[in-house]
Amino acid sequence: MSSMVNGKKAAQYLRTSKAPFLTRVKESEQDKFAQQAVAKAQDAQWVKREAARQELGNWEQWRDLGEQIRQHVIRYLPDYLEEFSDNVEKRGGHVFFAQTDDEAAQYIKQIAIEKKAKHVVKSKSMVTSEINLDPTLMTVPGLEVLETDLAEFILEEDDWDQPTHLVFPALHKNREQVRQVFEKKLGYKGDNDPQHMARFSRKVLRKHFLEADMGITGCNFAVADTGMINLVTNEGNADLAMCIPKTQVVVMGMERLVPTMKEAETMDNMLARSAVGQKLTSYLTYTAPRTGQESDGPDDFYVVILDNGRSNALGTVFEPILQCIRCASCLNVCPIYRHIGGHGYGSIYPGPVGSVLSPVLDGGYDDFGDLPYACSLCAACTATCPVKIPLHQLMIEHRRIMMDDQSQANLIDDTVMRVMGLGTGHSSLFRTALGVDHTMLTPISKKQPETAKNLFASDRHVEWMPFVFGGWTKVRDLPDPPKHGQNFRSWFAHHKKEQQA
Amino acid sequence: MKVVIFSTCVVDLMFPNVGKAMVEVLERFGCDTYLPKEQICCAQPTFNSGYVKESMQVMRNEVDALLSVDADYIVGPAGSCVNMLKELPFHLRADPVYAAKAQTMADKTYEFSQFLYRVLGVLDAGAELDAVATYHRSCHMTRLLGERTSPFVLLGHVKGLTMVPLPHIENCCGFGGMFSMKEPEISKQMVDEKVNDVLSTKASVLISCDPGCLMNIGGRFNRRGEKITIMHLAEVLNHNVDMSRVKYVEGRSAGDGAVSSVRAAKEEGALV
């Protein structure tokens, strides 16, 4: 499934796995290393992120500001896109509006062919994964593509393994796995000390930077009133990818704008603290085509602005998802991501943001309909989001569309939920249920010694339930409901009688 | 003062001990309690599953039921369900008549611990429990209702009770209402981590303000054959009570009635 933008197929490359959802969940559960790595990263990030936010002070007011800036940009998106592209062109750059992934990738491929590029260096960018750029470029004979972000470099060397996190793409790999990849693919002879391997990579990458003739980066923020691109990195690889090659291509989602440098400063502050728990990243760069007086920067500067299903959100309840600045702090607090990891989601955009965004880009629920249900609605994502996207509420909105509007549930589950709606909406029905629940469950309840004390009013519990309720007893015991005469309402009635007497 | 008991469907169906403890504690502090029999459920089971249309009647019924007694306050024993009552004016926004009624209802609704601490000003409820316990901080109560103080203040004053911190207190226990049934494969991993965290504290009692979470964590303890005693905060505060121990927030005393804004709870910390 893919959505259509003006009659053209979009969002075709979001999936990272063809396996069904439950298979992916099972595979993730078996990958104990990846699970522990995610848990450890979440715990460490929690401390760093909260400290960095606290240090800034008045975090809730910063969030209000972040939300206002992003909402404002989305509301006036056409105006800011026009202002930005005018300013890029005034500086001598070129802007291309791509409606779909293929359009964007083909445009960039054409640039590479025209420029006779042989060595393309890339810095980390989710949106280039979204448009399937690397495989597209590699169809050009004699052209080589190199990912220069250390984690992306590792994934590329490991036969283009898929990223599992928006900010830490190789989170699922341990140092020994990395060493083996380096040894096999690059002839690395050292140990698995991350510092040694990073130093080795630096040497390999530096050589490629110096011979690169085309650089491709993503874009954290595009500043409308200057036509500049803002990038935040910790490795400096994006700066080299921008400064050395003669041709530079920037790929950005169409929502990634800020009005001026002032708002960019606010957003950078919130992004670095939210994404990696730092005041700022090691490198914070603003760039644009080289003008006459400047000593470095590209001669040819192209910006590709991508829709690819984003416009599906405009004017709908899902519009707030376009506020996202890809800090991934929602992944870092999500208890579901903690267990199923990026692989479980099966989208290049995993975690809470991915569960909301993937079906929006995809324009339907065929590929990612499971994701909005892979959420306990704990709202940790909503609470941490620096731009206040109501993520958990948007999960419910997806569910509402799937159930109420599209009736996607199977007949039995659907009937159970509708009966539940009736039973909790009409008090005579509910009181009937209160009267018979004990009797009905007695045949399937078991008498056994309980290890959880004070949870089970009787000495019986239930280990098997029919329908969707079976999911409960698959994992845990259900208390046997009290007999009618012993339930809370009966007690209360009796209690009031005693008080009056 | 007149207090309507918002019993919640889980307490009505499963946990008479929780409802009873809450009523006894409230009455001890001078509340005249009422239990409107038309009430059923806050609508989360259907609403959160995407059955929004089917939830409208559930919500309207709950609003009417809870307003059927002209009380000063509405108090419930579950942070998640109380938060849902607070959201009802928003969910019923397409129906101005019910949205207005829901607002009247929501404005006087409190979760049990916040009612005791923030409205009645109770610091020490006079209870005694000789145990080492840990507290599960439920997600909706913490993040959506914004209540992250009251239970800890009240537990901190229980005689004989030693509270030990729960590792990963910020993480969901895997309940999530219908999530626990629809996604058992994921929910199991979450509740197992929670059970392991509780075990690591060596506490003998697990306390919370949400019966749903307790039913989930306790049910998993039982399935695994691990020992624990499950208690709702109301049961702890109703244990071995000696009213001579009762203490109030400075400047307050019994029968003051009261009003401290719950909004203050939301401003106490970053919403993490």
Image (cartoon, rainbow, N blue to C red):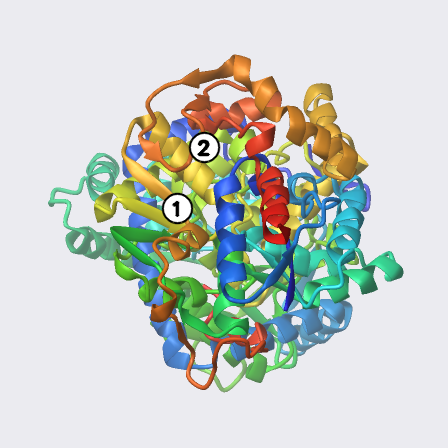
- Horizontally, residue B266 falls left or right of residue A414, namely left
Q: Amino acid at mark 2?
A: Ala
Check the image and report above or below for A201 versus A364: below
Mark carried by residue A409 = none
Residue type for callout 1:
Met
* Rendered residue at 48%/74% (across/down): B121
Output the chain of dot 2. Answer: A
**Which one is in front in this view, the residue at disc 1 or the one at disc 2?**
2
In the rendered image, residue B182, in percent from the top left (x then y), is placed at 56, 30
Q: Can the viewer see residue A271?
A: yes
Residue A295 left/right relative to A422: left
Q: Secondary structure at mark 1?
A: strand
Dot 2 crowding, Cα within 10 Å, few <14, some 14–19, many 20+: some
Judging depth in this view, the residue of A151 and B161 nearest the camera is: B161
Residue for badge 1: B231
The quadrant in which residue B144 appears is: bottom right
Quick check: A414 left or right of A325? Answer: right
Q: Residue at x 81, y 62 (%)?
A: B101
**Could you say where residue A181 lies in the image, as x and y percent from the top left?**
25, 37
- Nearest the camera: B155 or A39? B155
